[in-house]
């Protein structure tokens, strides 16, 4: 019997940095689709009505309802000699990049129905390619880092990679303009970015690893039973509710900020400046939060960050067209400090949930947990964006037109105030969260004692 926990396993910084490149590619795609594609490219360049643009995103997420859990299940049960997660990095990398490029092609002679059908079909293909990469990638995280704090550290590197990806996504508009502007400029920019999305995955495959003892205990119960067990797991339900609330707040801001700056503030050119400084603030605050998190419960850090964002982000309600770009950027930078935590902590906390499940069931089910977690995150954000764009459509938002005061006010309140409500719900969801640092240490001891 073991009387003390295993020594903390520290991963090399290079391993963490290369692992973070995976989230760089995934976040480039996700951010480009939410920041630029759905609310700007599809409505302003491709000419889709806002409700149809939001429906493209929603249908893609409904596809994820099937593919994300199935991919998690598949990676849990894969028995290839090369591994159960990492081989998928080599399988899906090129299709992922090609499908991203195809999303941004223009169909100048096509009807609304034909455009909607094309963009929906390609979006679904791209979503499947992303799933084949993302679910095994995320499932590796609690396997590579088993220590409570080391998981936070590896997640910090992953988040840093993700922020670089968001920066690349924000640069798509300027890149498209530099390549000639208009639909052809976006198509050229997407080809370059699509190639970049595929490039790092062989390197990630080389530097990541899987543990033999985890691979020796794959999931064996039927998928429907697994799903039922996952949703009966109290800590998972609490964590999912908190993460969903935070991600809906994030996705609302991501999708609507470009419209907020364009139609409420009235200076579309300020978007890249405000967004760039915001992302810089998030990046710079990650080492601070990593240091603060050591020795403290992750749920507590999540609550503190959520409340910080709630207060600072609400200041956008007060902004007027008279505000300078630097005043807007200052509020964005303050908001970014809290934003960093809301995005960082839940993925670090999911590892403890999976360890508790291992203790209860004797199976390693990182794939299914990450598949369901990822799908619910995508669906929550897609529903929020669909409803927001649908409301703008009903209120009379039209491409290239002067927007009414009602539309402008709706954009203002949905961007600045609606996220605060969801952040408050996320804080409430983690009330008396059971998987504290001390509780996880006890789980690790019991897992060690169970091993032969």
Image (cartoon, rainbow, N blue to C red):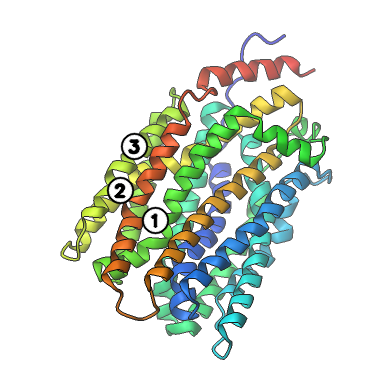
User: Element under label 1?
Assistant: helix
Question: Which residue position holds label 3?
Answer: 307
Q: Earlier in the sequence, mark 1 or mark 2?
A: 1
Vertical order, 103 against 111 (above or below): above
Label disc, if present, on residue 253 of the rendered structure? 1
Label disc, if present, on residue 266 of the rendered structure? none
Q: Position of residue 317 (x, y in %)?
A: 25, 54
- Disc 1 crowd, CA 10 A, few/some/many (<14, 14-19, 20+): many
> Are circles 1 and 2 on residues that touch, CB within 8 Å?
yes
Task: Tell me: 173 left or right of 137.
Answer: left
- Disc 3 crowd, CA 10 A, few/some/many (<14, 14-19, 20+): some
Residue 146 visible in image: no
Task: Tell me: 232 left or right of 185.
Answer: right
Mark 1 → mark 2, Cα distance in angstroms: 10 Å
User: Element under label 2?
Assistant: helix
Q: Position of residue 202 (x, y in %)?
A: 67, 56
Q: Residue at x 30, y 71 (%)?
A: 268
Q: Earlier in the sequence, mark 2 or mark 3?
A: 3
Q: Residue at x 42, y 28 (%)?
A: 300
Question: Which residue position holds label 2?
Answer: 313
Mark 1 → mark 3, Cα distance in angstroms: 16 Å
> Are circles 1 and 3 on residues that touch, CB within 8 Å?
no
Q: Earlier in the sequence, mark 1 or mark 3?
A: 1
Residue 4 visible in image: yes
Residue 215, by quadrant, is: top right
Q: Position of residue 420 (x, y in %)?
A: 35, 45
Vertical order, 181 against 26 (above or below): below
């Amino acid at each position: 019997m073991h009387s003390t926990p295993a020594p903390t396993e520290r991963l090399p910084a290079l391993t963490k940095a290369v692992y973070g490149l995976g989230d760089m590619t995934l976040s480039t795609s996700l951010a480009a689709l939410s920041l630029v594609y759905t609310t700007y490219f599809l409505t302003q360049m491709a000419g889709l009505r806002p409700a149809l643009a939001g429906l493209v995103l929603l249908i893609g997420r409904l596809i994820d309802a099937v593919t994300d859990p199935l991919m998690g299940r598949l990676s849990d049960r894969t028995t290839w000699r090369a591994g159960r997660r990492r081989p998928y990095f080599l399988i899906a990398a090129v299709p992922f990049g090609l499908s991203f490029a195809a999303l941004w092609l223009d169909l100048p002679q096509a009807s609304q129905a034909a455009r909607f059908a094309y963009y929906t079909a390609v979006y679904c293909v791209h979503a499947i390619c992303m799933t084949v990469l993302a679910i095994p990638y995320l499932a590796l995280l609690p396997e590579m880092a088993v220590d409570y704090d080391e998981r936070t550290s590896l997640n910090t590197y992953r988040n840093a990679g993700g922020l670089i990806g968001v920066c690349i996504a924000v640069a798509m508009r300027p890149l498209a303009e530099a390549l000639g502007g208009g639909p052809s400029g976006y198509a050229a920019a997407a080809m370059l970015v699509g190639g970049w999305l595929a490039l790092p995955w062989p390197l990630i495959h080389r530097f990541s690893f899987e543990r033999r003892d985890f691979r020796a205990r794959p999931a064996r119960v039927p998928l429907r039973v697994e799903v039922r067990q996952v949703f009966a797991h109290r800590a998972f339900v609490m964590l999912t509710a908190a993460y969903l609330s935070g991600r809906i707040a994030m996705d609302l801001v991501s999708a609507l900020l470009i419209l907020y700056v364009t139609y409420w503030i009235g200076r579309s050119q300020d978007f890249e400046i405000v967004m760039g400084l915001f992302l810089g603030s998030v990046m710079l605050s990650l080492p601070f939060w990593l240091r603060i998190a050591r020795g403290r419960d992750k749920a507590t850090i999540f609550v503190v960050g959520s409340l910080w964002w709630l207060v600072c982000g609400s200041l956008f309600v007060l902004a007027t067209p008279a505000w300078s770009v630097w005043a807007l950027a200052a509020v964005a930078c303050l908001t970014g400090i809290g934003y960093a935590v809301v995005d960082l902590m839940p993925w670090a906390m999911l590892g403890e949930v999976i360890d508790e499940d291992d203790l209860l069931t004797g199976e390693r089910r990182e794939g299914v947990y990450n598949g369901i977690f990822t799908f619910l995150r995508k669906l929550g954000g897609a529903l929020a964006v669909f409803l927001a764009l649908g409301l703008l459509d009903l209120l009379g938002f039209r491409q290239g037109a002067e927007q009414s005061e009602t539309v402008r006010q709706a954009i203002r309140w949905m961007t600045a105030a609606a996220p605060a409500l969801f952040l408050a719900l996320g804080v409430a969801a983690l009330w008396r969260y059971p998987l504290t640092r001390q509780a996880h240490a006890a789980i690790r001891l019991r897992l060690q004692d169970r091993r032969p």
